[in-house]
Image (spheres, rainbow, N blue to C red):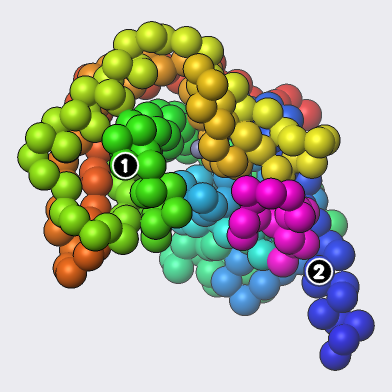
Amino acid sequence: MNTLLNNEVLRSTEKLYYQDQYLTSTTTQITRVHADALELDSTVAYPEGGGQEADHGTIELPIGTLRFIWAKKLYGTPIRLEGFKGGKLGGIILHMIHPDDLHLLEQVTVHMPARVSIDALRRDRLTLSHSASHFLYAAAVQLRQELEQWTIGCHIKEDGARFDFLVEESFSAEEVREIERLANELIAHDDVIGNTAVQGLEDARLWSYRGIEIPCGGTHLQSPQRIGRLSVRRKRLGKSKERLICEFPEASTDLSIYREQHA
Ligand SMILES: [Zn+2]
């Protein structure tokens, strides 16, 4: 039992999205076949993490093409660095197979050659949204510093992002307007966004912009220009619980920066 568990912990998927964020496909092989998922030796698919939704895509195999509708990271070892609470090093990535394609799994074998590709438009939208969410967060913390300690969740989708906070007082309409103004002020600088690995640990990453540093392993833009104007609104979730939501109706996607890896 323990041996099996250790084996699970030690296996890891090579995360090509950290080597090249713009790679939309690669040739790899099957590492393990699960009841509803495939594990690959390496992948371009970003798994759900840090609030960012997972990539969608396809896995082409000699027996046919299977769609995956989610990717999730399992196992790994905790990052022992200040500020990286909850982060993990290594681990495996499961590509969750579309229900209509599950019947093909019984024909899949370990070491079978595979080509994994992601939906680049979805990735680009999630990357935009994720970057936008940091400007919302940075602006909110600039206004109320204590929010940094009282962030209880975030969700980054293709068309918007949100943060949930525990608060003593609800956000007033003036505060929401001020957060929106501060976020747009940051975006308007159109400076370089940094996204670097800390101490050579590929899973311990830092997002940085004009002196603001946020531990984050998500996918990001190189500058905020494509986000356009951010609109911010709040939602009351209950007693002492508030949600800030940002949307970016002017955002422009750019698929020209993405490329496939040829075998
Ligand atoms: Zn991030």
Q: Judge by depth and name the residue closer to the eye, 85 or 222.
A: 85
Q: What is the three-letter code of the residue carrying label 1? A: Arg
Element at badge 2? helix
Q: Which residue is mark 2?
A: 9
Q: Position of residue 185 (x, y in %)?
A: 30, 16
247 up-or-down from 164: above or below: above
Q: Which residue is mark 1?
A: 144
Residue shown at 28%/24% (left/top)? 182
Q: What is the three-letter code of the residue carrying label 2? A: Val
- Tell me which segment is drawn in magenta: 75-91
Residue shown at 87%/86% (left/top)? 2
Looking at the image, residue 75 sits to the left or right of residue 243; the answer is right
Element at badge 1? loop
Looking at the image, residue 204 sits to the left or right of residue 154; the answer is right
Question: Could you tell me what secondary structure mostly forms the magenta stretch?
Answer: loop
38 up-or-down from 133: above or below: below
How many marks overall?
Answer: 2
Q: Is residue 76 magenta?
A: yes
